[in-house]
Amino acid sequence: MLLSSLKKIVEENQVGKNFSLVRNLLKENLQYYVLDFLFSSKWAERLLFKGGTCLRFCFDLPRLSEDLDFDVKNYSASVSQEVAKDIENYFVKKWQFKKIKTKVAGNGHQIFLKFSVLADLGLVKNPKSETDILFLRIDLSPVLSKSYEEELSVKSTYDFNFILRRYSLSDLMASKIVAILRRSFKKGKKVNFKGRDYFDLWWFLDRGVKPNWKMIKELAGIKTRSEVVRQLDKKVGLVKEAYLMEDLRPLFKDQKWLVNFVKNFKKIYESERVKLVKS
């Protein structure tokens, strides 16, 4: 079932031969399996889903997302090793899929799931120089804020049914703003810059979401809302179209719409930022 579902994705998305897009569509399919396991396991009560993938699965964020991000209650260094082992066993025992290996990195905060499937999917033309592995990353972090609201979302598809435990939409917006304020970009060398953060910021503003200001002040150490907005304005002003496009291109099927969005992003932000000022 797993391999056949991946093959179907490849067959349906060969137009334009955008390998990065196809790869992310494959990752999204695999994310369902991982989420199905995690939120039906002993870990379900301790995990708080967050990030772009949470927004896509729970709120229909109109872009793909590459990684799975969670905060873990009562986090410890051993959590990642245990979760990695449990996920590997899940794929092997429940789905009889043995072409998976796991690796824990980033001082125990990252799990890499390595699926040896690209050759089987016809996506490896030169085995000597191209990898057969499709990587899916899981980021695990301790819960850092005391000012958050925990909510549940039901996810039901033809193949999966599970209940996600996540942060509220206001909390998710707050964490996105904090991420933007913390990330930087240096000429000639990328340092954490993610164009997707700015797309997500627009998405929150467009929906009229009010951020959890208490969480922002707690995590970013900024005392006033006006200072948060001032720093956001400064970050947006530094964004280059080329870098924004580079990061977002693999996350959208509609490339024409994306080009138009990137070209007009700063004007769009300027018209939407008033919602942030008044929130």
Image (cartoon, rainbow, N blue to C red):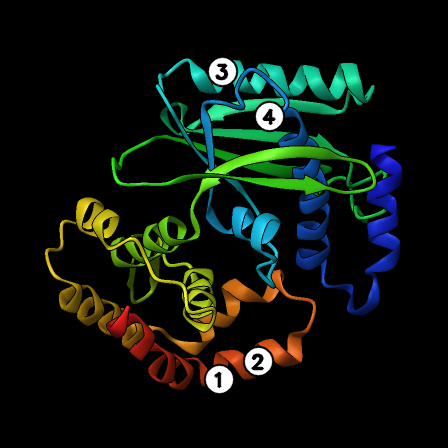
Camera-nearest label, 3 or 4: 4
Quarter of the image with the N terminus is top right
Label 2: element kind: helix
Q: Which is nearer the N-term, disc 3 or disc 4?
A: 4
Outermost residue, left side: 223
- The alpha-carbon separation of the residues under discs 3 and 1 comes to 43 Å
Q: Which mark is residue 259?
A: 2
Residue positioned 54% across, 65% down in the render = 248
Mark 3 in CB contact with mark 1 (< 8 angstroms): no
The residue nearer to you, when weighing 158 against 192, is 158
Q: Residues within 10 Å of mark 2 (few under 14, many from 20)?
A: some
Marks 1/4: CA–CA distance: 39 Å
Q: Earlier in the sequence, mark 4 or mark 2?
A: 4
The answer to the question of whether label 2 and label 1 lie on touching residues, with beta carbons closer than 8 A, is yes
Cα gap from disc 3 to disc 2, whole angstroms: 41 Å
Residue at numbered disc 3: 81
Residue 186 location (% of width, % of height): 28, 63
Say whether residue 130 is left or right of residue 211. Answer: right
Estimate the x, y position of residue 241 in percent, counting from the top left.
Answer: 44, 77
Q: Nearer the viewer, residue 141 or 151?
A: 151
Q: CA distance from mark 4 to mark 2?
A: 36 Å
Mark 4: which amino acid?
Answer: Leu
Would residue 199 be found to the left or right of residue 9 on screen?
Answer: left
Give the CA distance from mark 2 to mark 1. 6 Å
